[in-house]
Image (tube, coloured by chain):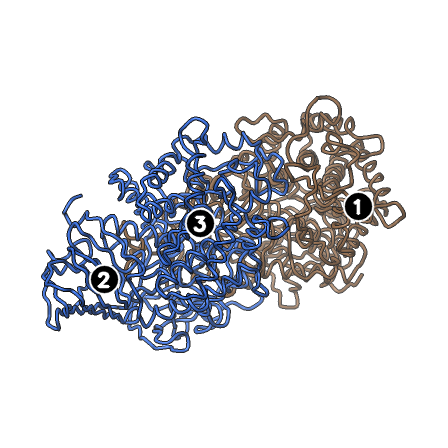
Chain colours: A brown, B blue
Amino acid sequence: MSTNPSFAASKAVPLSNVSIHDPFWTYYADLARNVVIPYQWEALNDRVEGAEPSRAIRNLRIAAGLEQGEFQGFVFQDSDMYKWLEAVSYRLATHPDAKWEAVADEAIELLEAAQLPDGYLNSYYQIKNIDKRWTNLLDAHELYCAGHLIEAAVAYAAATGKRKLLDIACRFVHHIEEVFGTGTGQIRGYCGHQEIELALVKLYQATGSDRYLKLASYFIDERGADTSFFIREAEKRGYTSIWSEHPDLPHPGRKIDLSYFQAHEPVRQQKTAVGHSVRAVYMYTAMADLARLNDDKPMLDACRNLWNDMTRKQMYVTGGIGSTHHGEAFSASYDLPNDTAYAETCASVGLVFFANRMLQLEAKSEYADVLERALYNTVIAGMALDGRSYFYVNPLEVWPHACRCNPGKHHVKPVRQQWFGCSCCPPNVARLLTSLGSYIYTTAESNQTVYTHLYIGSEANLRIAGQSFKLTQTSSLPWSGAASFAVSGLETHTAFTLAFRLPAWSQGQLPTVLLNGQPYSFDKADIHNGYIRIEREWSAGDTVELAFAMPVLRLRSHAELRYNAGRLALQRGPFVYCFEQEDNGNNLASLSIAAAGEITLERNDKLLPGVITLCSEGYRDTAAVADNELYSMTNFAEPERTIIRAVPYALWGNRTPGEMSVWLRYQR
Amino acid sequence: MSTNPSFAASKAVPLSNVSIHDPFWTYYADLARNVVIPYQWEALNDRVEGAEPSRAIRNLRIAAGLEQGEFQGFVFQDSDMYKWLEAVSYRLATHPDAKWEAVADEAIELLEAAQLPDGYLNSYYQIKNIDKRWTNLLDAHELYCAGHLIEAAVAYAAATGKRKLLDIACRFVHHIEEVFGTGTGQIRGYCGHQEIELALVKLYQATGSDRYLKLASYFIDERGADTSFFIREAEKRGYTSIWSEHPDLPHPGRKIDLSYFQAHEPVRQQKTAVGHSVRAVYMYTAMADLARLNDDKPMLDACRNLWNDMTRKQMYVTGGIGSTHHGEAFSASYDLPNDTAYAETCASVGLVFFANRMLQLEAKSEYADVLERALYNTVIAGMALDGRSYFYVNPLEVWPHACRCNPGKHHVKPVRQQWFGCSCCPPNVARLLTSLGSYIYTTAESNQTVYTHLYIGSEANLRIAGQSFKLTQTSSLPWSGAASFAVSGLETHTAFTLAFRLPAWSQGQLPTVLLNGQPYSFDKADIHNGYIRIEREWSAGDTVELAFAMPVLRLRSHAELRYNAGRLALQRGPFVYCFEQEDNGNNLASLSIAAAGEITLERNDKLLPGVITLCSEGYRDTAAVADNELYSMTNFAEPERTIIRAVPYALWGNRTPGEMSVWLRYQR
């Protein structure tokens, strides 16, 4: 491993070492713990009135022989339960609680009861027809579900020290190891939906057992190496399709688009983010893990290529990815329409994972900037402020009338839903929010550096240069740019570096820095890859205070992103803002915003305590066209002056349902 | 019938009475006769290299026992052949030709050979399984195909005096009369795709036989009266679906959206244009016919309601209708996106039919304005200048990169296609272009008026007030606003009215009028429903010269049509203009056009002789964002000045393929 800090790999900090105490994030942490986890448990048990039933628990009970009935819901329904278990684990890691540990233990007993003697566990095939297991990797999500089981198991063992779920997971993995591989009689294939790869890396990290890392590497390296695998598989099972009304009959007319599954070429050769966006980012996450753990430079190059393509050509300003609902997929460079956006919540959760792993590969602020963009915008927007309803799709422009009437926009919902038939997103938000503490810092032994990636008030027990210490962060983000750090519990003076990310939203304005209350001067040499490095002997009691500029940014898109031509978006700090009907009246398209001039900040505690909203001069087109004329010749009169108000995109849709837009026309 | 001219019904002029001699339209008339009809005959015979095969003739030959094989193509493939026969008939009506009459006769013999003894004729069911005929009116288009057979038969008899095809059609209709109705043992239903209704009206008009008018009225009145018909039918046949890969198996999961078929409520109660747009306008055409022929005021009210909703809330500025490709359907009021537009060519052809029938109901210039808009823009754009390729979908904005990569835009083609698997549009354009002469005038005996709706150079043999005469029109449209009329062949001085439409594109500026070379003064009382009425005793040798103002119009959309906020479109005379990459360079989204100032006219004979293109001052955004940044803070600098050029939308896509846009951002 190089000691050049620009390539130093750094390590995540265990979740249980970090507790969050933050005026903004504590709200979400409390909500996740006190509302979201209980609510989602009710949902998984089909007890939320008016919501689409989950059937996840019911299916597992049938598989375990505890109930009679048919499998219901999507083929991957088990995974919702696993993701919820993972979220509970994180909750227990930071806030032990006997009641929820008992609920989780009960769920784990259900899984134990359902697991087959050979280790296989999947309610769909166990209920439908166990003889057909592993015959439809393309569609059936068996390894995907196994991956989520593994993630839950690793998290639960870390939180509670209990091994039962880990044993269940390992038994399943040992079965998978027998079934898959390049040996005689093994299936030389991989899952249609990537997930197990990153989970196996976690299992390797939790157990130290190489076999899991090898299996992860196998699945990644095999993918796209032989592009005929899914086609041969379809042939072999007679072209049946799980998605058909007649799943036992052949559907030879179906075209298998391998790029949807990122299986069109070996992953190391992939340079463009294509296909189903969640599959893509889950895979990229595993690729970045493997690049780091296998010291695999070509894999790192592939990760960088895919990162650059995705974040510089295919990402919404809100950190949403996957712009088309056709296949929940990437479309093409600069094709980021606002009103038909897909931008699935899960995809932004996966983007956070990928960014987090890239940061571990190489601490560059670009990764943390994107992580922050996805987290503070699309991920939080994915859940209502009461924690009980969710967006699957995160549009950048909503006209409810068109969403209701135009089938091309039926996927765009102007209001959050209680639950979904395919409910991957809600537990994904839950597991991210409950594990937020592990995204703030990484530590690199190679250059003895503690990196601060996110400015979130917290206490972290860290270890660097052979010493343990506590780093207490106090942050005024996201509403203003002050963050301070106090070192404590350090037994001896110790030389190491604290590196603080320079957020892109400061627009190159360097922060003022106080070290132990005194101005700390630094020069360009102290800045590496977007982090200010303070390298010194640290002692208990040392403090660092940072004050970042947090100007209101008028953002403009790349010229090729044509949907935003003549429009701007507002950002301040990590928050992208949006314009809602509630503040600006009907017909947001008739508004334009001043391209220059002051934008004032206003506090709006009604939305959420502390919220800063933005006010700008703007204009409203006068209704020049007579009401019964669709097109007419008119004077292009000066529009009326008006005040335009913006709220954080993260919080949209929490008041009266109505129009919303992130990008607004500007007037010079 | 009232003698109040505002409600006077007027009659179409038989096609054979009108010949076109027009600098603009003669090009299309010649093209239709000399290129389109021969080309489409080759296409129907699967002899166009590189084009999707039609299989229409082949299917009919199999049905007739002349070939062996399976039915191929869409269930309604017969109709392409019928529509082509109708077009040939119109061609023979105006330009008799032994060769094409012989080809048509041969085709008619094929139909005679294929027809069953009981009159039934449909290659799909005759090849697949005759026992299943009439069991799937929802999907199978049997009556739709019968309708096109009838239209062809009426046209061929009118053109040639030959009855064979008319006899085939009548035999089929007599079979249909037995099968459908309210009597015992009859199917009390109607076709999923309206068409036979308007065809039966033509058959009534051609034969004078009431039974056909009654059958048309039955189909219209029954529609939506019992909303369970299609559901009961599906139940009865076991929920099979023609569109399935397994057409003999049940598909109970399919939801039948009755509004797609305009069968959700009785047609007289329908106030909003909904569902599949071609079905809709074909039905409205029949409704307008029946309102007139049955003197049915409630039906007239329904027609007016549907007309107003469609043309004032759901029509593109190009006369395109049906904005969504999901179901080729209307979306909702003001939901007219440009880049995902469907605007099927057939739908605008159908809109011309409906407008034509509304004009016969009541001569109001609004109907002719819309007819002209659809005809001069979407209908002509539907065919390349060489007559050998076609648009099915007529977008108002094209970015080829996105059309290629974004599945939500796969229906939008940046270049015309040689043929289509579903090739309804090409023969629809053919039959409209070959029958254009019948859309120019109508005559009303009730108020002894000859209405001029379209300014197209032509000779028409007309009859009014008991006298026959010839009206020779010379027109400089669409490139300038002069039209003159000469009366000849009138044996005696005769009192009647010549009424000339005041086109909406003159924006209320009244034309200068010369009567026999002398200024003719008229006042408001001489203008009724958008027509200048010249009521006098006419004699052979009389002339009228009109000079309409033809300013360049900067059009703005209704404020609720949000996609066009901040944008304008150019129109001059009947032509809507568009901006093409060929004239304006790459990235049309980066352009804006001056909201005021002079727009100059330029002649471009290269596109087509006589073409007027438009030049305006405009601006090009400078590429302020660095190439590797997707979003950035920039100065909103003044854009560069540039010249922006527009060509008629009708002619777009006839040069190098590239971007196109009808609506452009404007700068004040």
The chain carrying label 3 is B
Return the x and y of residue A145 as percentages of the image width and height: 72, 39
- Kindly identify the amino acid type of the residue bearing the numbered disc 2: Gln
Label 3, on which residue? B149
Going from N to C along the chain, the mark reached first, 2 or 3, is 3
Query: For the residues carrying marks 3 and 1, which lies nearer the camera in this image?
Result: 3
Return the x and y of residue B152 as percentages of the image width and height: 41, 53
Distance from Cα at disc 1 to Cα at disc 2: 76 Å
Q: Residues within 10 Å of mark 1 (few under 14, many from 20)?
A: some
Distance from Cα at disc 3 to Cα at disc 1: 73 Å
Visible residue check, residue A87: no
- Kindly identify the amino acid type of the residue bearing the numbered disc 1: Gln
Classify residue A647 as left or right of residue B269: right
Classify residue A440 as left or right of residue A165: left
Q: Residues within 10 Å of mark 3 (few under 14, many from 20)?
A: many
Query: For the residues carrying marks 2 and 3, which lies nearer the camera in this image?
Result: 3
The chain carrying label 2 is B
Q: How many marks?
A: 3
Q: The N terminus of chain B lies in which quarter of the figure?
A: top left
Classify residue B95 as left or right of residue A25: left
Label 1, on which residue? A205
Q: In this view, does B358 lie above or below A301?
A: above
Residue at left 28%, top 66%? B456
Distance from Cα at disc 2 to Cα at disc 3: 42 Å
- Helix, strand or loop status at disc 3: helix
Query: For the residues carrying marks 1 and 2, which lies nearer the camera in this image?
Result: 2
Label 2, on which residue? B507
